[in-house]
């Protein structure tokens, strides 16, 4: 039992505002969409030049390491969104965001793998989907889209980039390519609350 004098009311209006339902800057959103469209146009040109054996990926950095996500699993990229922290969850869950009325969990890949990582001051989130699950991956920075020829991908080995069973491979220049389906199928992502 709690004492009524110690009870704190929740300011639901503040919680609602913190989820950022509306775009705060329509001009910035329009500019971001235009830049994204330009990148996708360049990406389509690169696909024609690389052939069928290339893997199209989104490159990003987290805690000094470079990672790649196959673009067929990438839904959105968000710059510096408002992340609302959650209590009583594992440390690899950094909070939640509201993406057009859908609440998504923010997931820190490095902490999930037991590696050190500080939260970025201005995070970027990469919304990924696989295995009937959609998450927002925390990134320090999205670097670019790339086409990686199959010959430049080696089988995963133990590196600073995480467990090898959740990687498709490592590029010749040290980029860890995530196996998003295996990552999002991991049973540790399911949090059972009591």
Image: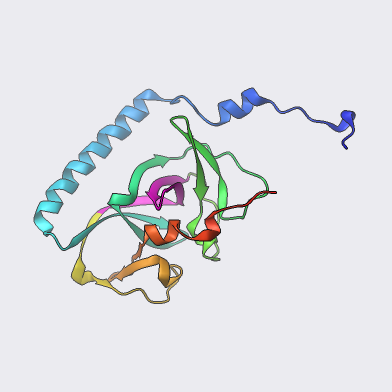
Whether residue 117 is visible to the viewer of this picture, yes or no, is no
> In the image, is residue 183 above or below residue 97?
below
The residue shown at (48%, 38%) is 81
> In the image, is residue 102 above or below residue 130?
above
- The rendered magenta stretch, by its main secondary structure, is classed as strand
Q: What segment is highlighted magenta in the picture? A: 123-145
Indicate the colouring scheme.
rainbow
Task: Depth check: give the residue in front, 181 or 41.
Answer: 181
Measured from the top left, where is residue 187 in percent x and y? 52, 60
Measured from the top left, where is residue 38 in percent x and y? 21, 39
25 in magenta: no
The residue shown at (63%, 26%) is 14
**Residue 173, image quadrant:** bottom left
The residue shown at (46%, 68%) is 162
The tally of labels here is 0
Task: Depth check: give the residue in front, 14 or 25.
Answer: 14
Q: Is residue 88 left or right of residue 6?
A: left
Q: Is residue 126 left or right of residue 107?
A: left
Measured from the top left, where is residue 126 in percent x and y? 40, 47
136 in magenta: yes
User: Which quadrant of the figure contains the N terminus?
Assistant: top right
The residue shown at (70%, 49%) is 194
Task: Depth check: give the residue in front, 63 or 136.
Answer: 136
Q: Is residue 151 left or right of residue 86?
A: left
> In the image, is residue 163 above or below residue 118?
below
Whether residue 106 is visible to the viewer of this picture, yes or no, is yes
Measured from the top left, where is residue 47 in percent x and y? 14, 53
């Amino acid at each position: 039992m709690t004492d009524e004098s110690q009870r704190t009311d929740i300011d639901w209006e503040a919680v609602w505002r913190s989820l950022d339902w509306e775009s705060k800057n329509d001009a910035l959103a329009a500019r971001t969409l235009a830049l994204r469209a330009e990148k996708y146009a360049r990406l389509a040109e690169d696909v024609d030049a690389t052939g069928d054996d290339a893997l199209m990926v989104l490159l990003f950095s987290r805690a000094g390491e470079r990672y790649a996500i196959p673009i067929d699993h990438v839904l959105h990229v968000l710059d510096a969104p408002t992340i609302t922290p959650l209590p009583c969850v594992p440390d690899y869950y950094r909070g939640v965001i509201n993406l057009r009325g859908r609440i998504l969990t923010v997931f820190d890949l490095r902490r999930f793998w037991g590696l050190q990582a500080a939260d970025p001051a201005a995070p970027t989130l990469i919304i990924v989907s696989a295995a009937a699950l959609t998450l927002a991956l925390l990134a320090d920075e999205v670097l670019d889209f790339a086409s990686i020829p199959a010959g430049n991908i080696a089988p995963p080995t133990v590196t600073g980039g995480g467990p090898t069973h959740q990687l498709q491979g490592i590029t010749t220049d040290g980029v860890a390519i995530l196996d998003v389906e295996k990552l999002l199928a991991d049973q540790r992502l399911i949090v059972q609350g009591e």
